Structures are given as structure tokens and as C-alpha cells.
Amino acid sequence: MRKSVFVVIILALAFAFIPNASFAAIDLSTADYNLDVVVNSNIVDFPDQKPFIDTAIGRTYVPLRFVSEALGCELQWAEETQKIAITKDTLSIYLTIGANMAVIDNNGAQRLVLTAPPELVNERTMVPLRFISEVLGAEVNYTPAVEGDKSRVDVAEKPVDTDEEDVRKVTIETEKGNIVVEVYPKLMPITAGNFEKLLEDSFYDGLTFHRVEDWVVQGGDPQGNGMGNPGWTIPLEISLQLNNTRGALAMARSSDPNSAGSQFYILKSDTPSLNGQYAVFGKVVEGMDVVDKIAVGDKMLSVK
């Protein structure tokens, strides 16, 4: 495998930088096998180990090989190291049995994503369906069981957006002036996509910067006290090409790595100790003088 040595090194480094997160092994005592998995309108046949929902946490697990093949992927498995490589076109996902970190390589751009670890069940590699499908560019919809029918998960591949922007500019209008940031959808699709959704809903308009220190400003909390979120959280995603330097735009979170939602921070000084810990997804390109003037309670008049 052309990138295997490089990726093994990345995986080793990832665990040195990412805080420990609590991921329990799959609990089969809470498994609900009353489930159909449909990929591109075709029901996937699982001849031995069936997919199931871990009802304790609401996560769907599937045997990796059958779903990856249904999505047109190549799969490589190294039994000795228990490492897995899933490849489709220029996109590769690297996983390790029992490890909660996935390495994703998209045409040379590497990022790390914290996810539920794959596990071996009856000699089949079981993986979280939504994570794998969405990384591969598919949409996932769940229909719960009713009147004796099975629950159903539909996985549908989306057309490749060849016109997707590498960079998007966003203007944060404040009482002190405008801050213009670049956001990187291709480098950080989970984080930038979440930010885009919030912008489309005008979520940030009228919110305040609730934290200001000599090295950082932080805002985007609907409660205004550092405790709020939009009603959901996203997994920790880290680009190996973006660092916590002056002007960096990144998602704030609690001690739980997967707790980011809407709060973001902008750095006023280089802070390398945060590298590998937080999702940097953009940078200020105009208005750092405005960032330096922000005070606690200053409003974001609009973010678009």
C-alpha cells in the first residue's frame, strides 16, 4: 500500500496529541438486529454477521466489507497489525481495530477524526455506518421500525461536487468593525460544513463574544456564558495542515473532544500547545486589528 508507512506514523502521532476519550467496546447485550441496510436503493445481504443498532448509544454497526463493496470501495486488512484501509478514488480512510482515531487522506490532504472504534464481532469487522458512509460522501437516513417492520438505514451516494470551493470567505460584522475569515471546506469538511449550516440559519447574528483574553477571543454561544450549543455536537476533526497560529479560526469545546457545536475562537497569538487538540478550520485574512479590540459582550451583528 503506497501510503501505509506514512499513515502508520500519523496514527502513532495522533494518539500522542489527542486527549483520551471514553469509547466502550460494542455491547452485544444491547444489540437490535431488527434492521435492514439499503445502499443506493439495494438491500445489502449480510450472509453471516448481521448489522445491528447498539440501542444503548443509538449507533448502527455494520460489517465493513459488505457496505464498502456496495459503495464501490477497495478494502485492505492487515491481520497482524489489525489495520484497515478503505479506498475510493482519491479518498482513503485508515482505521485500527479498537482505536478511536481515523486517518483520512483526500488526494494528499490528511486529517484525523475521532470516532467510535471498529471492533471484531464473530470475525467480522464492525464499524459505525454513519461515519464511514458520510466520509465517503453518502447521505444516511434512518427509519425506525413501525408495526412489526424492521428498522431501516438508507445510504445514498451523492453526486461528486467538482465545483466545491477550496476556500470560502465569511465576514463577521461587529460593533468594532469587520473581521474577514477564510474557511476551508475541502480540508475540514465536517467542521466547515457545520459552520456553513449555522451561517445559513443566521445562527450567529446577534450573539456575543463571551470570552476575551490576551491570547484569544471566543463567541458563538447562544447562552452567552460558554455553556451553550446549537442542539448538537460534531466529532473532533483535525487537519494536519492547519495550526493554532495568530488569526486561526477554530472550534471551541469542553473536555469532551466531540463536544464542539457552535462556539468558535480566534487566536490573538500563536498557541502551539493547542495543536492536535482543536479543530482549526480557517483564518483571519482581514481585520486582525478588530479582533485585538474585541471586548467581552461585543456583538456579532451578522456573520455571512
Image (tube, helix red, strand yellow):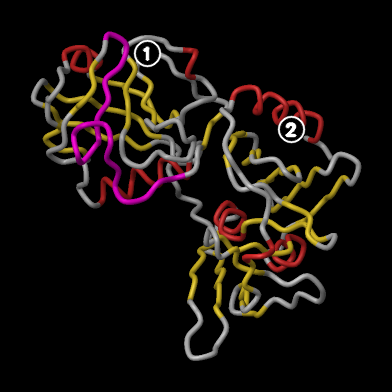
Image disc number at residue 142? none
Element type at marker 2? Answer: helix
Q: Marks 2 and 1: CB-CB under 8 Å?
A: no
The residues tagged by marks 2 and 1 sit, at their Cα atoms, a distance apart of 29 Å
| Residue type beneath disc 1 | Arg
Residue located 69% across and 53% down the image = 88
Residue located 51% across and 52% down the image = 162
Of pointers 2 and 1, the one earlier in the residue sequence: 2
- Span colored in magenta: 214-234
- 192 relative to 40 in the view: left or right: left
| Circle 1 crowding by C-alpha within 10 Å: few under 14, some 14–19, many from 20 | some
Image disc number at residue 7? 2
Q: From the viewer's perspective, is residue 292 above or below residue 39?
A: above
- The percent position of residue 125, horizontal first and vertical second, equals 77, 57
- 197 relative to 4 in the view: left or right: left
Q: Which residue is mark 1?
A: 246
